[in-house]
């Protein structure tokens, strides 16, 4: 068995992966923040935003599974992660060359293919760098750093909009700088010890070899994910509700500010969730995150959507995403043996990606055809169902450091 790199959980590899996540998210959050307004300049409706976000995540889904399966069979995983970061940086910057919604879809999908390649590899490298007892803190730290990039990204987008006078092409091109910095950090800051590659096993057999509690987790994650729309839709929601009262410029500025607030809460609660995950039942915490997501969706359906209620919705959204992502990753790492981490993280990411594809397309379409109440009520029902399923998991560490269902 490969020993973790370094004795402390906050070691060079954990910090290096965290910084790479920060710079990469900085890059593509600039793009994500500007995407609704950029698409509006083409006259594209909410359905186009849902289609772009959903197809990008869907395109990445099977790449994640293939990447995880393949890298379990390599003595060194890091080069695959570096390549994924490079492709993401190039794809995001390529939006600068687009002049229509379908071209944005292609560029965003290319960027997310790179993201799909790197995601399970990065998570496997992170899990290998720490002990099983500190998975929560390590994954919480990585999520916190990632979200710090998501705070800096929108702020950078606002500053660049003013400095470059809404020159979207130049701003998208500038995302290449932090994007390539992330690839360099992964290449030179992250340490990886040579590991014993898993002997060849067919893809279907690899999936069947994953433990039953993990497969139960996948079912709950998949059901929740079918309603878990991309949160760029919250920006569009805020713009639409604030525009009649405040005008286009102020509505766009305040919507971006709310998204920054969302990401501040995301960063703070990622580390809080990680610390809690190392001390209490991860399944119970994850179910709580799912129910919190349902509360956010129901708030959109039933509350009068003014600046204050939108602020509360963005806050709850940031908190639940932080808890959900940290707990899904750390619970996955706990439920599966070290030698299967690649295929496990790849499968988890694929299930999430399929959910993202379906949810963003369905929510965007329901919104366009029937309004926000129908769209977000759909999400709320699936969030509650996913939470009820994950409550059935009661993982308990056994003598070998794995987990079983009670």
Image (cartoon, helix red, strand yellow):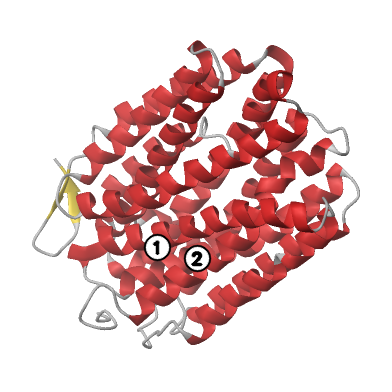
The residue that disc 1 covers is 142
Query: Residue 269: x, y in percent?
Result: 34, 47
Q: Residue 375, position in %: x, y?
A: 60, 20
Whichever of labels 1 and 2 marks the residue nearer the N terminus, that label is: 2
- Give the residue at x 37% y 36%: 220
Residue 72 appears in the picture as rendered = no
Q: Is residue 138 left or right of residue 280?
A: right
| Callout 1–callout 2 Cβ contact below 8 Å | yes
**Disc 2 crowd, CA 10 A, few/some/many (<14, 14-19, 20+):** many
Mark 1, Cα crowd under 10 Å, few <14 / some 14-19 / many 20+, is many
What is the count of numbered marks? 2
In what element is the residue under mark 2? Answer: helix
Residue 335 shows up from this direction: yes
Left or right of 393: which side holds 107?
right
Which residue appears at 25% of the width and 72% of the height? 9
57, above or below 223, in the image: below
Q: Quadrant of the N terminus?
A: bottom left
| 306 sits left or right of 30 in the view | left
Determine the image quadrant of residue 207. bottom left
**Residue 54 sits in which quadrant?**
top right
Residue farthest to the left, as pictured: 399
């Amino acid at each position: 068995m490969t020993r973790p790199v370094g004795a402390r959980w906050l070691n060079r590899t954990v910090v290096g992966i965290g910084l790479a996540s920060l710079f990469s998210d900085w890059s593509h959050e600039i793009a994500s923040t500007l995407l609704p307004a950029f698409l509006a300049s083409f006259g594209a409706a909410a359905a186009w935003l849902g289609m772009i976000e959903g197809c990008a995540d869907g395109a990445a889904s099977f790449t994640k599974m293939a990447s995880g399966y393949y890298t379990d069979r390599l003595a060194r995983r890091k080069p695959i992660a570096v390549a994924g970061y490079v492709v993401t940086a190039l794809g995001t910057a390529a939006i600068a060359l687009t002049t229509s919604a379908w071209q944005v879809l292609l560029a965003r999908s290319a960027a997310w293919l790179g993201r799909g390649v790197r995601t399970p590899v990065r998570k496997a490298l992170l899990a290998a760098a720490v002990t099983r007892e500190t998975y929560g803190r390590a994954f919480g730290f990585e999520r916190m750093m990632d979200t710090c990039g998501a705070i800096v990204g929108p702020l950078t987008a606002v500053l660049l909009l003013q400095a470059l006078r809404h020159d979207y092409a130049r701003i998208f091109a500038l995302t290449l700088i932090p994007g390539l910095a992330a690839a360099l950090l992964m290449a030179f800051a992250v340490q990886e010890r040579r590991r014993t590659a898993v002997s060849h096993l067919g893809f279907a057999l690899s999936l069947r070899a994953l433990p039953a509690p993990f497969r139960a987790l996948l079912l709950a994650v998949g059901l929740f994910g079918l309603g878990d729309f991309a949160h760029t839709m919250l920006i569009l929601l805020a713009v639409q509700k604030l525009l009649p009262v405040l005008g286009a410029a102020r509505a766009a500025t305040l919507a971006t500010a709310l998204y920054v607030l969302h990401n501040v809460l995301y960063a703070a609660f990622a580390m809080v969730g990680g610390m809690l995950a190392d001390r209490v039942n991860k399944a119970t915490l994850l179910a709580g995150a799912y129910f919190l997501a349902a509360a956010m969706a129901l708030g959109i359906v039933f509350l009068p959507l003014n600046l204050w209620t939108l602020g509360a919705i963005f806050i709850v959204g940031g908190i639940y995403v932080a808890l959900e992502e940290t707990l899904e990753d750390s619970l996955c790492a706990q439920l599966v043996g070290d030698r299967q981490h690649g295929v496990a993280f790849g499968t988890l990411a694929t299930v999430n990606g399929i959910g993202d594809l379906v949810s963003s397309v369905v929510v965007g379409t329901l919104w366009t055809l029937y309004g926000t109440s129908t769209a977000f009520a759909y999400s709320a029902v699936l969030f509650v169902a996913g939470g009820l399923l994950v409550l059935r998991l009661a993982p308990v560490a056994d003598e070998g450091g794995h987990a079983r269902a009670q």
